Image: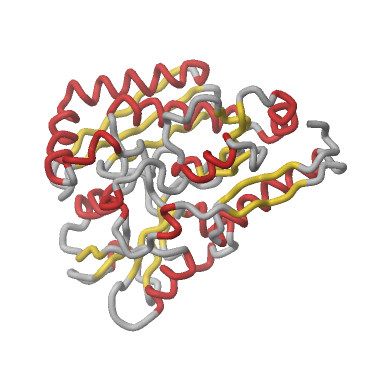
Amino acid sequence: MTINAPLRMGTRGSLLALRQTEQVRGSLIRAHPDLCVEICIIKTTGDRVQNTPLPELGTQGIFTKEIETALLNGEIDVAVHSLKDLPTQMPSGLVLHAICERVCPLDVLITRGRVAMRELQPHSTIGTSSVRRRAQLLRYRSDLTLVDLRGNLDTRLKKVDAPGPPDGAILACAGLHRLGLEPRITEVLDSRIMLPAPGQGAVAVQGRAEDENTARIFSILECRETRAAVTAERALMQRLGGGCHVPLGCLGQVEDGCLTLDAGVFSLDGTAAVRKCLSGDPDEAESIGIRLAEQMLAEGAREILDACDRTLHPETWQTLPIHTEESS
C-alpha cells in the first residue's frame, strides 16, 4: 500500500469510538496531508447486547473480536481501539502499530446536583457495570447502593439526569474529555480511592504484523511513555489472570525517566485488598508488571482471585478475555 492509497480504519459505532477514531484520523492527516482515510464502522457483541451486565456475557473480546476479524480478513487496514477493551492475547498476526499519547486515565464521579463523593447521603445509588469500580467504591463508601448501568455514554448521562435512581455514575475521565463533556464531571477520583482499568485513557492502533508500510505511517502517533506505562499494566494484568470478573486496577506513570506502577486486587465486596507499587526503568516495563504481579500473588492476591472465580461464573472463567470494560 502506498501513502496515496485509501486507508480503512475500523472502529465501533458508538459516539465515543467514532470521536476518538476521528481524532486519530485528524492527527494522521496532519502528519500525512495526502493520505486518504476512510472510517469503517463495525458492530461488536458488546454493542449489540446492551441489557446484560458485562460480567455475564462471558465472551472473548466483546468490544474487539469482530473488528479484529475484519482486520485479519483484509476488510480494513487498521483498527482503532480503546486499549482497555483490547485483550492482551491478540490473534496471531496482529500487532499494535501505535499507542497514542494517553489522556487522563482516572475515573470520575458524575452526580445529579453535583454532589461530591464524600457528601453523598448513605444509600445513594451509583451506577456502574464494572466490578472493578464496584469493589473499590464499596471499599471507600460501603454505605452506598450500587446498580448496574450500561449503554453508551450519552445514555448513561441521561439516566443520571432523570428523576430516580441512579443518583450518580462512575465513568472514565477520558471518554468525557474526548467528547468535550468535562463540565459534567463532579469529581475526578484520586487513584488512592479508585485505581483505573489497565490501559484506561489510551487509544491503540492495531494492524497486521506483515503490513510494514502502514506501521511506518502510524509511527508518528506513537507515545513511548504511554506505551511503557500500559505495557506494565497489561503485563501485570496478564500475570494475575484478571479480567472483567476481577476487581483489578492499576496505573503506570512515567515521570523523570522512571516508571511507577501502582496496582490493587480487591474482593467483590471491597473488604479485602492487596495493593502494591513498584518502580523501575521504562525500558523494562513488561518485567516491572510481571514482578509486581508476583509480589501481589505472594501476599494473597491469588486467594482474592480464586474467591472471585468461585463467585462469578466459574464455568466460563477460563474463556474470558483479559479485560472487557466499556470504553467509559
Quick one: 166 or 5, which is closer to the camera? 5
For the C terminus, the quadrant is bottom left
Figure check: 217 above or below 20: above
Q: Write down the quadrant of residue 316 in the picture.
A: top left
Q: Write down the quadrant of residue 120 in the picture.
A: bottom left
The residue lying furthest to the bottom in this view is 163
Image position, residue 5 (x, y; %)? 82, 39
The residue lying furthest to the front in this view is 73
Q: Write down the quadrant of residue 238 in the picture.
A: top left
Residue at image position (23%, 26%) is 296
Could you tell whether 69 is left or right of 35 in the image? left
The number of numbered discs placed on residues in the rendered structure image is: 0
Image position, residue 177 (x, y; %)? 56, 57
Q: How is the image coloured?
A: secondary structure
Image position, residue 131 (x, y; %)? 26, 50
For the N terminus, the quadrant is top right
Figure check: 222 above or below 328: above
Residue at image position (47%, 16%) is 284
Residue at image position (38%, 53%) is 189
Residue at image position (40%, 36%) is 251
Image position, residue 292 (x, y; %)? 31, 23
